[in-house]
Amino acid sequence: MVTVLNVSTSRARALPALLCCTILAGLPVAAAAQTAPARTPQTTPRQATGAQATRAPATSAQTAPEAAPAASQQGGTIKTLRVEGTQRIEPETALSYTKLRQGQAYTNESLDQAIKDLYASDLFADVSISGASTGDIVIRVRENPIINRVILEGNKRLKEDKITKEIRLKPRQIFTRSAVRADVARIVELYRRQGRFAASVDPKMVNLDQNRVDVVFEISEGPKSKVRQINILGNEKFDDGELRAQMATKESRFFRLLSSNTSYDQDRLAYDQQKLRQFYLTQGYADFRVTSAVAELTPDRKDFIITYVVEEGPRYKFGDVTVDSDIRDFDGKQLAKTLPIKAGDWYNAKAVEDTVENLSQTTGLFGYAFTDVAPEFNRDREALTMSINFHIGQAQRTYVERVEITGNTQTQDKVIRREVRLAEGDAFNSFQVKRSQDRINSLGYFQDKFEIKQEAGSSPDRVVLNANVEEKSTGELQLSAGYSSLERFIIQANITQRNFRGRGQELRAGVNYSSYSKSVELGFTEPYLFDRNVAVGVDVFRRDYNSFGFNGNDRRTTYGQVSTGFQVRAGVPLTEYLQLAGRYGLSYDEVTLDEGTFFTNGQCDVLKAGSYLCSALGNRFTSSIGYSLIYDSLNSRLRPTAGQRVSFSQDFAGLGGDVKYIRTRVEGAKYKGLGSGFVASLTAEGGYIHSLEGARADGNDRIRINDRFYLGMPQFRGFDIRGVGPRVLRTPYTLDSSGRQILQTDRSQITDDALGGRAYYLAKLELELPLGSGARELGLRPSIYAQVGSLFGLKRPPLTANFPTTVINGQTVVQPLPLTNASGQPIYTYTLADGSTVPTICAAGIPGAGGTCNGVVGNTPVLRANPFLEQFLGDSPRPRVTVGVGVNWNSPFGPLRIDLAKALLTQPGDDPKLITFNVGTQF
């Protein structure tokens, strides 16, 4: 049976000290030094798990008694002195906490003090002294128990490891009431930091054998305290809503269900006051201040009401803006002309900070690492102007004493050091420090927000650059499997190591398999060959791809392409931002069509496949050499927020092989941070491929179908895969309810073959939107965008709509084409008596002995093709325009993007798509 005494938290915190002293009427006065034994509290039976024990409030044991009142007798000499009741503690150890010693004098006061000292040691739960009348002093003690376990119950919102590292009580320590009370306060404080101000903790003690206890903290977490209302008093120039928008704390509303900023946080309260001040200072209110900020808990202890009282003050403008330099290399008057703030502009504290930063960077460009730029303010309260003089203090030109690389355990020192644009002995340059920082961040080997710190060197003209990196995992292993009605089983396995052996090398391998796509790829890149700034790489691949279209709701393969080959790459920097890259590739391409679907009499049937597909059949070698000229000033290659990138590429096929062409592409991108987490980007690209061979005899385009450009999802959002550009649509004829022949209008019933184009252009304007810290940690990055592009330039292929027509009841009817033999005679199917069929050239019956057809029953003609209308559409340079919103998510399954895009401007034949979903693999 387990005995438990339930004590509320408030009572447990305020248990009064129990007086334990002996007052015996009629006994000798010396007995007044003795204390009464501890009183056992009333308990209530309760069942518990484990061994039989007593669970009682952990703070309900008796407290140290007050000393007994002094008696008239002053004591005597201690004849004998012993300690009784100790178990783990040696008697001598217990005596060491008192001043009592055998042979020394004692008084009632000294005995009382001994009791207090023993209680103060926190080793004993009960202490009493007897023998004061005879001098034979006996100290009887009951030791505090040893903690067996510390158990947390009821904690769901806070994990156990977060609580246990904050509390002091641990197993095998001595149990004390003060430690329990302190730990209760710590746990409550933890929950308050989480915004749970209604949380309570009820400590319990479970008595075990051998003077051991289990300490149980029963936690009632309560609801998270929300911010019900934010009141602002004293604001006249800006309304409450505009000021609330500047704060991190938000009012609890249903549309902020997933936001963490609606919870009350005392630290955030101070942060919001600073945000209010920053906002007013950027609007010219230099005298603004928050006079009070009060957070009141509602009576139900569920929500908070926050009230700010503000004083806005008058609005100021900039007065005279000057620069005063103690460094001879700088002319203050010339610098003042370049400043972005001018007299007469509204005062803006952020502009002042930016000016200080810009001046510091300017001096840093000339080698002054530790320049002190101090703005000196002169406020005119009558004219409401703020004059500022930026004083550039005296500084010495500094040089790099050394570059220290720390924190790298996997990455070799040279991999980081070769990205640093400054070496020991170089003149300091703040621009080169920033550039070095960007290049190291672009490696992708280290955690974000890496910075190179500038520290004082051994002398005033020396600076130490400290690159303290924090490595992150650079290996990626992605395995995925799935099933769909179209692809059947889908298996993907990709492994990438972007920092192989810590040398900065990239090694990758990938396998993809489905019913319509199979590929194996291997790649290796060495960014610094023989420790020189020359990058080399090689890729080996085999890709088996089946192009497809839809016939009705059934997906059908159009042509199959198997490519096997390799590519060798090399690149060298021409300047800091300009690079030249070259490559050579050799591939063997096999383009096939399904003979059972598209062939007739062993030949590709243009009526079934189209001349544009029949002309693509064959096996060819492609031997190409190419180059790229790249200008890249992006601050990060992984997630840029500033800078630009422009590339010009050309590939020449015809260095041997079976095909000859020249392909040219131009790409450009510019990124700019707009502040507050907003990033704007403008990207554009275009290309053209030109054949170096003569025209084809069959009238089709000389550029093969698999060498052309294609446009659609995912690069052109708002359109389906290959949904833009030249294509051939085959629209079948169907019969309506009255038996009239009409063209099918349902796009899903139309055969759609995308042919690609020789030329294309595509541009995109995108704005990346900031999210809260929680969403950023999940890797969510939403954006809005607009795109414009087109694909065109293909030679019109010969079409095969040569169906016979006839007029029935005034309607022109398109007739099916019958299958014919080599002599051009139609082929029919004759049904035998047993139900089997045989082919024949007789329209009725079968040929007789003389070779003539006998019979009156008509035979069924074998059709070569049902009637359809064939159209060539989409070959237009006119722009297609889409707008949309998308979300990038760096999910555990790989990079994922979801887009909702609307095509505003299309051309006939285009295939728009409102929602697109794309999962890619990072390489």
Image: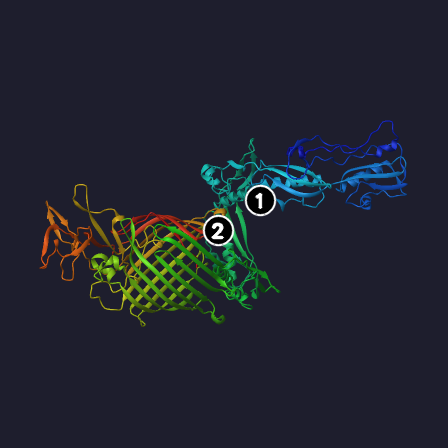
User: Mark 1 or 2, which is nearer the eye?
Assistant: 1
Q: Which mark is residue 328?
A: none
* Quadrant of the frame with the C terminus: bottom left
- For the point 43% across and 65% down, which residue is it? 523
572 or 396, which is in the foreground?
Answer: 572
Residue 367 picture location, percent across and down: 53, 64
Relative side of 303 to 69, left or right: left
Query: Tag on residue 351?
Result: 2
Mark 1 / mark 2, whichever is N-terminal: 1
Judging depth in this view, the residue of 225 and 118 nearest the camera is 118
Residue 633, picture quadrant? bottom left
Left or right? Give the position of 719 relative to 87: left
Q: Amino acid at mark 1?
A: Lys
- How crowded is the residue under tag 2: few (<14 C-alpha within 10 Å), some, or many (20+)? some
354, above or below 256, in the image = below
The number of discs equals 2
Give whichever of 867, 280 is nearer the camera.
867
Which numbered disc covers residue 159?
1
CA–CA distance in space, label 1 to label 2: 45 Å
* In the image: residue 38, left or right of residue 594: right
Q: Would you say residue 330 is visible in this rendering?
A: no
Q: Quadrant of residue 206?
A: top right
